[in-house]
Image (cartoon, rainbow, N blue to C red):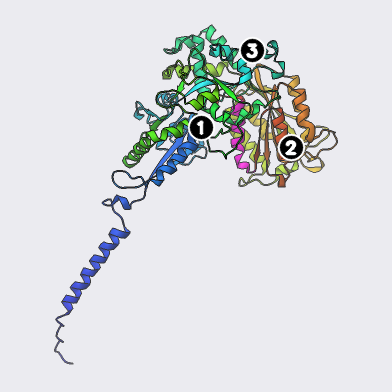
């Protein structure tokens, strides 16, 4: 073996050095271009700003967020911004915020908000007073208003003129304090009894503000309302009780129910609706959800006029609230989006929906549509303190109408079919929804349950005899016993059951309560041993109950292809007064029952 070593090439050290240098450069290039760092925020993901808005303006805010996004907005560090807008009723959103956006309270609203746009600062007062909300002391002391709209009493023009509008300066009690026989005594018996509608004060701003205004009016004040004005005050209690006696029911969304007021020549089931002025304007435009309508769209019927009570009203201020706990980048993005919404160029987009702006004066279009002068300015009631608001809620729940409720549950064989809820058939899904949403019923509500199939000896036996809901134990036990029929009597005696239930409710009518029937079914009427016809049932029930004293709600599980007679059910409930939900997905039964129970029994489930 040769012991001599080969000489090292003089080029190798240079080659190694060059290779190492190229490697360092490559790694650095990859890191800068493929692995962004905090030193280059423009390469980081966009700031996601989540905005939760009250429902009446959510379409507008969503549209403005899209416009904002097209301008490629960035915060000071250079990061881009994207804005998402989620519509959520103000009271329900307040509850979800207080619970740190728990799934039970958020109810499908998955984006926890950085910014909250309720209809009124009333909800901020309540949130700040809610001891379950950990960040209540961190809420901003003041919030800027992005739009304004006063509370009004909206009526069909002919009805408003019949009580002295526009010549007479009408107060809250001059309208809402009328008794049910007002129209008969005045020679307008074909209008039916006087009644009005407001949405549930527990969740809706319009209903909440109307209730506060009622207490102000009863106490003869526009500011400085105290708990002493509310407690043990027979005069105030009597006034509130009289006003609540005229409430037909408390829908979760006023706009969905305005069509129930009827058209020309029809008996109108409601005489008045208490709501924001801008909602009355949108109704008149045939645009209840605030979205653009095709050219040539017809306005709604009847057209409404707005009564601004002479003894004062509340101005809903639509505040922009940046919630506590928001990170620095999200806060900067939130402040920038607020400034965008407040730019003078945005004013026309808000006023086009019937909002008022900074000076509180109406536009000519708004005033003309609702029948008042362009210079209209109301006396404004002050937002009460948290203790007063809490006491108003407590007293209102004691004085408001309670429900008399008959629930009809389909027990036919098809209710044993599989639902989309894993491991549950339709009957089990229905029972679970009934049980889960019983929290929306008041202890003093009267409840009765019938189960129906096609046994000629017991078409619709009592599952729960009429009784006070109380602690709900009897109700839960009765629901638990509901079972699908089997054998030869597993058909659907729908028509005769609804007919008999309606007759039963009329014979036991309690006008101090909201009388209602809830029908849950998944099939067509296929019991033919009785001449009852679904085709003519709606007209027959309307004839038997011309004033609509018994409200009817329908929930149809499944599609027509699966056997549900959706058109007949919808037509029947519309003719007799309220609403029908077609629930193709049994998992959505929760929402359907929650809306119905809140409509007839407001103030629960908070």
Q: Secondary structure at mark 3?
A: loop
N-term-proximal mark, 3 vs 2 = 3
Q: Quadrant of residue 269?
A: top right
| Residue 410 in the image, given as x and y percentages of width and height | 72, 37
Q: Residues within 10 Å of mark 1 (few under 14, many from 20)?
A: many
Q: Is residue 56 visible?
A: yes
Q: Quadrant of residue 52?
A: top left
User: Would you name the residue on which mark 3 appears?
Assistant: 179
Q: Residues within 10 Å of mark 2 (few under 14, many from 20)?
A: some
Q: Main secondary structure of the magenta part?
A: helix
Say the numbered circle drawn on residue 56: 1
Query: Which residues lie in the magenta part?
Result: 584-599
Q: Is residue 328 magenta?
A: no
N-term-proximal mark, 3 vs 1 = 1
Q: Residues within 10 Å of mark 3 (few under 14, many from 20)?
A: some
Q: Is residue 368 above or below residue 531?
A: above
Observer-side mark, 1 or 2, equals 1
């Amino acid at each position: 073996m040769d012991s001599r070593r080969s000489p090292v090439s003089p080029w190798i050290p240079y080659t190694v050095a060059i290779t190492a240098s190229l490697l360092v450069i490559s790694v650095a290039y990859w890191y800068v271009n493929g692995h962004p760092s905090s030193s280059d925020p423009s390469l980081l993901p966009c700031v996601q700003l989540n905005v939760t808005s009250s429902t009446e303006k959510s379409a507008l805010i969503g549209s403005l967020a899209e416009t904002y996004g097209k301008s490629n907005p960035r915060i000071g560090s250079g990061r881009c911004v994207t804005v998402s807008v989620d519509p959520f009723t103000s009271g329900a959103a307040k509850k979800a915020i207080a619970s740190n956006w728990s799934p039970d309270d958020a109810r499908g609203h998955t984006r926890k908000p950085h910014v909250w746009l309720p209809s009124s600062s009333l909800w901020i007062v309540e949130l700040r007073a809610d001891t379950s909300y950990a960040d209540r002391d961190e809420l901003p002391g003041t919030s800027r208003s992005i739009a304004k709209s006063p509370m009004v009493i909206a009526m069909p023009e002919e009805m408003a003129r019949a009580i002295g509008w526009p010549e007479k300066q009408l107060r809250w009690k001059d309208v809402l304090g009328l008794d049910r026989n007002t129209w008969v005594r005045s020679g307008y018996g074909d209008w039916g009894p006087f009644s009005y509608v407001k949405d549930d004060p527990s969740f809706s701003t319009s209903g909440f503000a109307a209730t506060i205004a009622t207490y102000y009016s009863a106490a003869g004040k526009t500011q400085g309302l105290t708990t002493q004005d509310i407690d043990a005050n027979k005069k105030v209690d009597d006034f509130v009780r009289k006003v609540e006696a005229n409430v037909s029911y408390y829908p979760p969304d006023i706009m969905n129910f305005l069509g129930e007021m009827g058209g020309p020549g029809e008996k109108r089931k409601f005489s008045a609706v208490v709501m924001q002025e801008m909602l009355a304007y949108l109704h008149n435009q045939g645009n209840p959800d605030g979205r653009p309508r095709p050219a040539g769209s017809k306005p709604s019927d009847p057209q409404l006029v707005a009564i601004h009570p002479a003894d004062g009203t509340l101005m809903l201020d639509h505040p922009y609230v940046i919630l506590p706990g928001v990170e620095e980048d999200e806060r900067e993005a939130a402040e920038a989006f607020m400034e965008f919404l407040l730019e003078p160029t945005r004013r026309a987009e808000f006023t086009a929906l019937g909002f008022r702006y900074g000076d509180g004066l109406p536009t000519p279009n708004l005033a003309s549509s609702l029948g008042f002068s362009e210079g209209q300015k109301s006396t404004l009631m002050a937002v009460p303190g948290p203790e007063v608001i809490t006491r108003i809620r407590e007293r209102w729940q004691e004085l408001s109408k309670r429900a008399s409720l008959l629930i009809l549950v389909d027990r036919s064989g098809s209710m044993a079919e599989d639902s989309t809820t894993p491991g549950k058939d339709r009957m089990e899904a229905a029972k679970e929804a009934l049980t889960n949403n019983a929290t929306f019923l008041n202890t003093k509500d009267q409840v009765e349950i019938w189960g129906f199939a096609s046994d000629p000896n017991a078409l619709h036996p009592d599952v729960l005899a009429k009784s006070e809901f109380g602690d709900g134990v009897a109700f839960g036990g009765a629901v638990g016993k509901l079972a699908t029929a089997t054998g030869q009597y597993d058909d659907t005696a729908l028509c005769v059951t609804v007919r008999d239930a309606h007759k039963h409710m009329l014979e036991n009518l309690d006008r101090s309560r909201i009388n209602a029937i809830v029908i849950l079914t998944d099939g067509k009427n296929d019991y033919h041993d009785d001449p009852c016809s679904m085709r003519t049932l709606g007209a027959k029930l309307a004839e038997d109950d011309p004033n609509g004293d018994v409200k009817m709600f329908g929930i149809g599980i499944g599609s027509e292809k699966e056997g549900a007679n959706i058109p007949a059910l919808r037509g029947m409930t519309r003719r007799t007064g309220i609403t029908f939900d077609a629930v193709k997905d049994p998992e959505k039964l929760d929402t359907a029952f929650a809306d119905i129970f809140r409509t007839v029994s407001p103030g629960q489930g908070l």
